[in-house]
Amino acid sequence: MTSITTTCRDILELLPAAQTACRLLFQECFKAGIKNIFITETYRSQERQKYLYEQGRTRPGNIVTWTLNSNHNSRLAWDIAVGPPKSLYDVTTLNRVGAIARKLGITWGGVWSAQIDRPHFEVKPNWIMPKGYKIEGQVIIPTTSKYPVQLIVESNTAKPITKDDDVMKFTNETLKSAVRDYLKQAVDKKLIDKSHLEKFDAGTLTDGDFKGLEIIIAQRSN
């Protein structure tokens, strides 16, 4: 069981609708040139919510939440932050992300009248992707400012190195690290066998292998 002091940044802990909404939001931000955002929290247990609520009230520290009831508990919400050179909660960047979210039917805390929460995004369980949008590739959503948002489509991967054009090879080390992190998270959650990560590290994982793993990870995380 995760400690109440530990922050979960794994989008696979969200419900399927929220996972898709989050990926679509990061994809559209990537396309709009916003690549320096990252996830800071996804699922939050009720115990952790209570722990955070106590901060600034019965426990030392600044107040970080105003409610004991959050859609983080329902696996339908996620928080983001902004990477360097911007400040962690750069208002201009968060406002741009919020405007994109609203076009996608995603609720943004930046428009709440009672308590403005610009880093917060959430959806309802029956959220569906708006007409005219689709997930265009593998969206690598960073959980640290170390890596930028990545959208892996054919044009973003290097040409394979075999005559059958199917072995994954990267010329961009940042992209390679992001893909490895995605596979490592899936292995840690026991969604796929560690042999796939070993193949990736050995440089023998094919494009076909990866596409198949994407389907398996999506199915098993639902």
Image: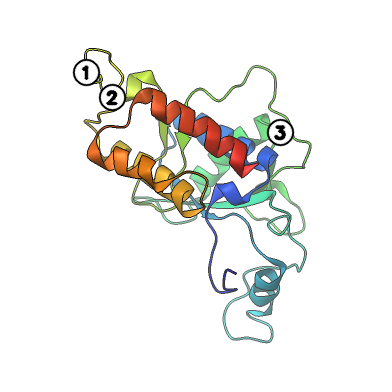
CA–CA distance in space, label 3 to label 2: 38 Å
Q: Nearer the viewer, residue 39 or 198?
A: 198
Q: Quadrant of residue 148?
A: top left
Q: Amino acid at mark 2?
A: Val
Q: Amino acid at mark 3?
A: Gly
Q: Is residue 154 visible?
A: yes
Disc 2 designates what residue? 167
Disc 1 designates what residue? 162
Figure quadrant of the C terminus: top right
Q: Quadrant of residue 51?
A: bottom right
Contact flag, marks 1 and 2 (Cβ < 8 Å): yes
Disc 3 designates what residue? 105
Q: Amino acid at mark 1?
A: Thr
Q: Of marks 1 and 3, which one's residue comes earlier in the chain?
A: 3
Q: In the drawing, does residue 44 fall left or right of residue 147? A: right
SS under mark 2: loop
